[in-house]
Amino acid sequence: MVLFGVLTMILAIALFSLRIPAIYFNRITIILLLFSALLSYNSLYIDLIGSGVGVFGGLFQVTTITQSIDVFIYLLGALVLLLSSKAGGAQTLSSNGLNSTLVNKGKGLSVLAEYPLIALFSVLGMSSLISSSDLVSMFLSIELQSFAVYILATIYRESESATAAGLKYFLLGSLSSALILLGSSLLYGFTGLTSFEGLYMLCSTTTANTAIEISVLLIMVGLLFKVSAAPFHNWAPDVYDGVPTVVTTWLTTMPKIAFLVFILEFQGFTQLANWSSWTYLLLISSLLSLLVGTIGGLAQYRIKRLLTYSTISHVGFLLLALAINNEESVESFLFYLIQYSLTNINVFFILVAFGYLLQTKGLSIYSPIQYINQLKGQFKVNPLLGLSLAICLFSMAGIPPLVGFFGKQMVLYAATHNGNFFLAFVAILVSVVSAAYYLRVIKVIHFDPTPASEMVSPMPSLAQSAELSSSDSNKGSDMGAAQIRPVLAGELATSILLVVNQLLAVNKPYSEKVSPYECGLDDKRSTTRRQKFSVQFYLVAILFIVFDLEVLFLFPFAVSLYEISTMGFWIVILFLIILTIGFVYEWSKGALKFTKDPTTSKINLN
């Protein structure tokens, strides 16, 4: 379906780009991705998908995991494109009779008809990559999505910073692709095989081969380069900071999902051949990513560079889960990947929303919010946006009861069960340290005063504009006194709720759990049946996933809100109280209590 959409969009843009507004192509692409997600979801009910189905002569393997990740990628891509459709404030180039690839100067960031087309190419490459079961299809899928994101980085070609960032991205990305191609060539030369199934069989029936191991490690280094894991991360801060914020939202999230899921499926070599070097490479990269992402982020004063180092730190958690490579760690990996992707996109949504509101004179139209200091005192102007960003950053820092805490807890739980106590300790330590730069952003938004020369006013609606024009001379200081009381009450209530939630989030074992696995699935191939797991633990996580999503979808309302009314303030407080009551109820039912099976002294992997 995505391939059909790509071909249709190529034809439509070539023939009708001067007659159809560019924003319509963006909306068509969103509908196409939503329909593709529906088709992928419906295919999950096919019985053959459970055991895997080879297509195109075995080049691709369709399984339940690949289809589930496809649904997530399509929905996330539609969400990001929804953000880009607002980037130009409905200013389209084709309505002015201009070519859609030019930039409309003086009217903000314009919508380009080619943007959704290149995004579709990227999505097609991601979907192909996670289903690849052959070295040839793997490399072609990587190049398809890589060249798409190179073009996305430089699609606004009149931006000098975007052009420089795209050139750096292209050169260093080509180096990583060369490493992947070198490893694939050596692997084919040593084995004469390209299909993953044949390679799995060879590794399971022979002893460890150093040449094969080196080939696979070269491929792995190239993949770590793609996900900006340390020490292969040097390109990421410059690239993500240089490209427009709308494009950064795509680059920081979408390609990483596909590459990390592919690494999860590709590491079957290590399980069969019992290679320690693969595990050591992942563990070393995880340790360096945790340290570099945390230490590097402390010195940043540009908001997108700070979020880039934050991403590197979170990639360290994901690599730690991949290095453990058991069922418990895979579950924690998938949960962490999904929740972090949603939270990260949420943060960029809010940054773009702030960009609509800030009158950034002299700064680039491509990235209106560049410095952390530009967000000074924005909570007093837009409380919902400030509160939404604070919740997202608290979630990234891993503060309970937000969903980011449960993601980190599951990864650390799997690491300690596997005996990786040192890395678990380092992960806890860097989580505490990284909270410093998250809290600095929150402090700037909520407590720093807005400079008089940089006072910002939100975008009023038409009715509010008429009211303001007629009563502006009579407002005086009464409006300031009316606003400060609900703002202070909101800060106090939010702080109390966060403290209460943190005190209640006790990490204790619970009696219902009799196995180290975090799910109730039964492995039909195993001789021992696993006990069903109480779902109360996940109810808490789902509760706050819903909370993050609610905050995400509140951003259009927050953008158009001129000033928060008393009714709106109490609605927000009531929503937080309901969530807190739900968390306390789940906690009282033993949701955060778990223990190992008292009859076993070791973790049973069967």
Image (cartoon, rainbow, N blue to C red):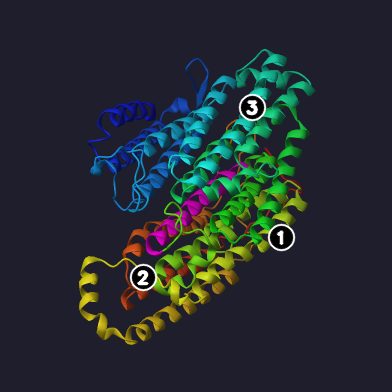
- Badge 3 or badge 2: first in the primary sequence: 3
Q: Quadrant of residue 465?
A: bottom left
x then y, percent, for residue 387: 45, 68
Q: Which residue is mark 3?
A: 178
- Amino acid type at mark 2: Ser
Residues at discs 3 and 2 in contact (Cβ within 8 Å): no
Where residue 532 appears, as percent x and y from the top left, is 56, 47
User: Who's the residue at 66% across and 48% down the image?
Assistant: 316
Name the residue that disc number 2 marks. Answer: 457
Instruction: Classify residue 234 as left or right of residue 54.
Output: right
Q: Using the image, determine if residue 198 lies above or below residue 130.
A: above
- Could you tell me how far apart the alpha carbons at marks 1 and 2 are, in whole angstroms? 40 Å
Q: Dot 1 surroundings within 10 Å: few (below 14), some, or many (20 or more)?
A: some
Q: Nearer the viewer, residue 356 or 506?
A: 356
Kindly identify the residue that appears in the image at 32 percent across and 67 percent down: 561
What segment carries the magenta color? 330-359
Q: CA distance from mark 3 to mark 2?
A: 50 Å
Q: Secondary structure at mark 2?
A: loop
Count of numbered labels shown in the rendering: 3
